[in-house]
Image (cartoon, grey):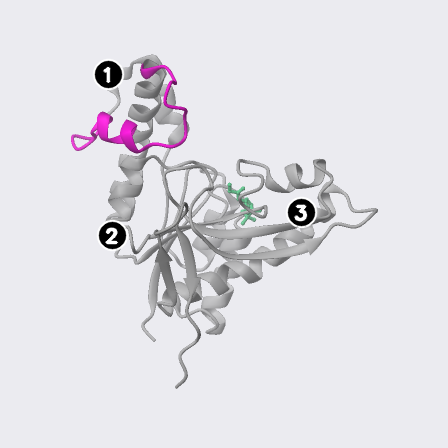
């Protein structure tokens, strides 16, 4: 089986990154991590990458936003940014959202994403792994990573059983809604928010006495198993996308026997 080159993006602690690094080290995951990037210079995930001798970098989303709000013209908008194309594809805002606001949002996003693209393009990677990366990608970025829609190249882990509770706080949403089951989902990234084809899920019971903290602890423990397993399926080329229905669904092919 060929070794998969993966790039990982983190915003915080990077415990999923650690689980992926450990799986690579143990041989459970036939992959090499070629970079760790972040939007947050203080992300502990960067430190985990550094300690493992992996190249790390930061794209300064906050700084670029600040520059944009002070002087929009000074922000570097990529020459290949096509606003109409992005607006036609985006699924983050309703179609009747004010055009001026959409223009600002996606122009700023393209500037941030161009910085990120420039940083990652020096590495050769097969798969971009979002491991607690708390930024949404626009079609501008996604189209430059996933050039063949039958083989998406961005993968994400989400702290809820999608399609329930997309967004930034899946375990809290699960807990505060009184769910009796929680879980995590690994999916390919598409133009919507946490809406892409589902690769794998794991679930846990929520029982009387559980708190938000215990729910998060149970969930994270499952994430650390699920993410390396799903990346392994990509490495083994066992995922097939079917877009003939209302939603694109992923079929997992059986393991090939030696
Ligand atoms: C994880 O729970 C992950 O599912 C979640 O952030 C946490 C990151 O933890 N991701 C999202 O909410 C993405 N929308 P980690 O930094 O310790 O891996």
The answer to whether residue 175 is above or below residue 83 is: below
Whether ligand 1 has any atom under 8 Å from the Cβ at mark 1 is answered as: no
The answer to whether residue 31 is above or below residue 13 is: below
Near mark 2 (Cα within 10 A), the count class, few <14, some 14-19 or many ≥20, is few
Q: Quadrant of the N terminus?
A: bottom left
Residue 224 shows in this picture: yes
Disc 2 element? loop
The single residue placed furthest to the front in the displayed view is: 245
- Looking at the image, which is closer to me, 117 or 100? 100
Q: Residue at x 33, y 29 (%)?
A: 109
Q: Residue at x 62, y 51 (%)?
A: 183
Residue 115 shows in this picture: no
Q: Is residue 111 left or right of residue 56?
A: left
Q: Is residue 251 left or right of residue 202?
A: left
Which is nearer the N-term, disc 3 or disc 1?
1
Mark toward the viewer: 3 or 1: 3
- For disc 1, the marked residue is 73
- For disc 2, the marked residue is 148
* Ligand 1 in which quarter: top right
Disc tally is 3
């Amino acid at each position: 089986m060929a070794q998969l080159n993966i790039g990982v993006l983190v915003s915080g602690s990077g415990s999923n990154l650690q689980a992926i690094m450990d799986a690579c080290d143990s041989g459970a995951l036939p992959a090499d991590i070629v970079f760790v990037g972040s939007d947050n210079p203080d992300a502990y995930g960067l430190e985990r990458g550094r300690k493992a001798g992996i190249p790390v970098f930061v794209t300064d989303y906050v700084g670029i936003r600040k520059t944009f709000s002070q002087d929009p013209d000074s922000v570097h908008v990529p020459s290949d940014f096509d606003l109409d194309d992005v607006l036609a594809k985006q699924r983050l805002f309703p179609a009747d959202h004010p055009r001026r606001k959409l223009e600002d949002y996606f122009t700023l996003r393209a500037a941030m994403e161009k910085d990120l693209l420039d940083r990652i393009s020096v590495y050769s990677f097969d798969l971009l792994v979002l491991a607690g990366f708390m930024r949404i990608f626009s079609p501008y970025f996604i189209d430059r990573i996933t050039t063949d829609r039958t083989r998406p190249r961005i993968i994400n882990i989400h702290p809820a059983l999608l399609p329930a509770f997309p967004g930034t706080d899946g375990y809290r949403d699960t807990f505060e809604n009184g769910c009796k089951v929680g879980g995590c989902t690994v999916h390919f990234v598409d133009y919507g928010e946490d809406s892409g084809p589902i690769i794998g899920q794991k679930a846990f019971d929520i029982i009387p006495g559980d708190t938000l903290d215990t729910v998060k602890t149970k969930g994270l423990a499952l994430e650390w198993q699920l993410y390396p397993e799903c990346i392994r399926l990509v490495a083994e080329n066992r995922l097939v996308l079917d877009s003939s229905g209302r939603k694109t669904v992923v079929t997992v092919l059986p393991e090939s026997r030696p």
